[in-house]
Amino acid sequence: MRQRLAALTTALFMAAGTLAAEEPPAAQAGGAGTLTIGITQFPSTFHPAIDSMLAKSYMHGLTRRPITAYDPDWELTCLVCQELPTLENGMAEKIELEDGDEGIAVTYKLHPEATWGDGEPVTAEDVKFTWEVGKHPDTGVAAAEAYRRILDIEVHDDHSFTAQIDRITFDYSAFGLPILPAHLEREIFEDDPAQYRNRTLFDRDPANSGLHFGPYRMVDVTTGARATFEPNPTWYGEPPAFDRIVLRVVENTAALEANLLSGAIDMVAGELGMTVDQAVALERRYGERFDFVYRPGLIYEHIDFNLDNPILQDRKVRHALAYASNRDVISEALFDGRQPAAHSNISPLDAVHNDDIPRYPYDPEKAESLLEDAGWNDLRNGIRYDGEGNPLRLTFQTTAGDRTRELMQQALQSQWRDVGFDVRIRNEPPRVFFGQTMAQRNFPGMALYAWLSAPESVPRSTLHSDQIPSEENSWTGQNYPGYANPRMDDLLDGIETELDEERRQELWDEMQRLYAEDLPVLPLLWRAQAHILPKWLTGLQPTGNQFPSTFWVEEWDRAPSG
């Protein structure tokens, strides 16, 4: 699953080294032993700013921290900073820019004891270096716009800095640029920025202790299979309880269940594990062995349409695909109705959700009528052709091994065949699907996956025209459909900078209506996270937003026996 760093303004403020001669004493774990977690995906890269995958965020929750994050109660909170900056407390201040427009200067104070795993302190210079990497046009970071909006970072001392931003956004307090260790990465970056993404230590030496400053550090990794984490000796917070955490990657969800029942893994991560239907079925049989926690969240399965495809450029065809999709039946058949049909990219659980938008209920006759109007009126052996004899044929891709997604694919393929589409399924392993196919827009037709966001997350990086990845912009941005609508651009810009809540809601409402009308993406289902936990695990709080539960792993523990 992709993690939506489409929450650009949130992403904006949230978006081989030499080890020290002596490391400080190891952080004392609580003696809780080993916790083995099953997940279904492995990151395409460990670099925190390149590509956006939830698998990477889940692992980084053990080893790193953003400056700010949305907690399990969906409240913005400091993780590395000492206090959230606001206009009221003086840590944020409106400024006049050189062109006469208004921007904002936001000051953060880092935790004074934050330290990289090799003993080097985490400093404001690291933050500035992170910005320099992200704003360089050749590095190809996932949310480049977030870096470009920062006009300057002024370092005051080791633990405080001020970011000058080119506009005032409603969520100006959030700061999520992933801090990079300048003492290890600067030389690699400055030597050749265009090759930095291929030479970074995050991929060449991911177990390097100097890359980590969370409760744990990665000590061993087998690409595609597992990663092992042990307490970080320089962690400044509460000591973590477990002596070791092992993340095992089992891409096939049936095999994941078998590993859980055999004891090869202790738990299944709700963020990257089984779907609700699989968990419910498992609970019926083994409810006495595990705790099952279901957390509704800001996550939706959807299908990206590649709008460079001549067939999908026609909005009538996209609407026909929607009308021919019986999402309610899929929800009932696969999820016992627990994963409701999605009609928008904004969750009904989000305060800014607008229910008054165009909808596409299952109506195959309407779908056929639209296809006739679009010129697909030559029906042969159940497949439609246009006037030049071209078949109504589309390729449909998703992550191979995900049983539920593959079942959804098959159901949709059948439903679309009923109205004349010839849909060919071609799936790929998650690392290829996300790291190459989606990142470089190499999917020729349709792609099924999920986005996960933060509350009131502005979907700029997935919908704004300047976020379409291309070779020219080093494949930055996450607008994989290639959607470009000037009015949508204006709405996204306006939402970000509108401080009046009532007026901002009006813009949110129009944005959601336009999204539903243009339909660059077909929303399918709103998902809940199904966490399957051992009875003895305490302290884990599912978040339901883009910040996984591992960001608070130091609160996890093993309950006393007996």
Image (cartoon, helix red, strand yellow):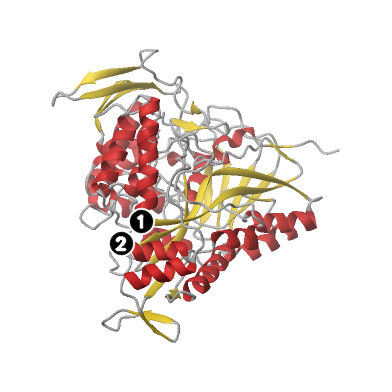
Tag count: 2
Q: Which residue is mark 2?
A: 307
Q: Residue at x 57, y 48 (%)?
A: 271
Q: Residue furthest right?
A: 562
Q: Earlier in the sequence, mark 2 or mark 1?
A: 2
Q: Is residue 260 above or below residue 406?
A: above
Q: Residue furthest top?
A: 89
Mark 2 Cα-neighbour bin, 10 Å: few <14, some 14–19, many ≥20: many
Residue 138 in the image: state x and y as whole percent: 23, 49
Q: Amino acid at mark 2?
A: Leu
Q: Are marks 2 and 1 in contact (CB under 8 Å)?
A: yes
Residue 421 falls in which quadrant of the image? bottom left
Q: Which residue is mark 1?
A: 520
Residue 388 falls in which quadrant of the image? bottom left
Q: Is residue 68 above or below residue 216?
A: above
Residue 133 appears anywhere in the view? no
For the residues marked 2 and 1, what is the alpha-carbon distance in whole angstroms? 7 Å
Q: Amino acid at mark 1?
A: Pro
Horizontal relation, residue 346 to residue 263: left or right: left
Horizontal relation, residue 525 to residue 127: left or right: right
Residue 231 falls in which quadrant of the image? top right
Residue 518 appears anywhere in the view? yes
Residue 468, numbered label: none
